[in-house]
Amino acid sequence: MPRKLSEIIIEIAMIGLKNHKFCESEVMHILFFLAHVAWNRDTKELDYYSNGEYLRHIKEFKISKTKLKRQLISDNWEFIISKMLKYKQDKYSKDKRIITLIGYTPWETLRVEWE
């Protein structure tokens, strides 16, 4: 039985943090979304949300640039996605599940649906 995909996405999202012991939930929401993009670029298609298509979704997250700069390893989204993609390929190359949905439940847990 493969590991729960939600656990793996949390693990991959942490790559985007400067400090793994401190992060705000708004920042993690963005990182979960970027991890989703990275995962599906490996399992579905390399141009999944390419050319900045994901930017309109990131803009929906109301968070200050100061918070992002303070907590993320970079303000370059493609850089973060590429690190996440490499990590996915290195550790989970055989896992070919495609993420169809990612979000929080009413119980504040991460839900990842896949096919």
Image (spheres, helix red, strand yellow):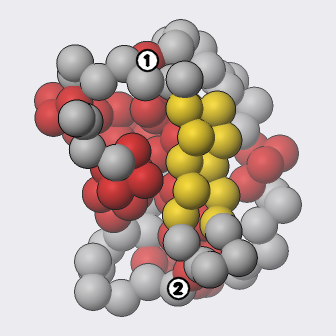
Instruction: Indicate the position of residue 87 as horizontal and vertical percent values.
Output: 23, 38
Quarter of the image where one finds residue 109 = bottom right
Q: Quadrant of residue 50?
A: top right
Q: Secondary structure at mark 1?
A: helix
**Which quarter of the image is occupied by the N terminus?**
top left
Residue sticking out furthest to the left: 90
Specify whether residue 18 is in view. Answer: yes
Position of residue 35 relative to residue 47, above or below, is below
Badge 1 crowding class, 10 Å Cα cut-off, few under 14, some 14 to 19, many 20 or more, is some
At x 35%, y 32%, the residue is 85
Residue 40, image x, y percentages: 51, 26
Q: Secondary structure at mark 2?
A: loop
Q: Nearer the viewer, residue 54 or 51?
A: 54
Q: Is residue 94 left or right of residue 75?
A: left
* Residue type, mark 2 in image: Glu
Q: Marks 2 and 1: which is nearer the front?
A: 1
Residue tagged 2:
24
Which percent across, then down, holds residue 59? 81, 58
Q: CA distance from mark 2 to mark 1?
A: 29 Å
For the residue pair 34 and 107, the one nearer the viewer reads as: 107
The amino acid type of the residue labelled 1 equals Thr
What residue is at 36 percent from the left and 69 percent from the top? 17
Circle 2 crowding by C-alpha within 10 Å: few under 14, some 14–19, many from 20: few
The circle drawn on residue 43 is 1
Residue visible at 62% across and 80% down in the picture = 107
As drawn, 88 above or below 15: above
Asked whether residue 80 is in view, the answer is no
Residue 51 versus residue 46 in the image, above or below: below
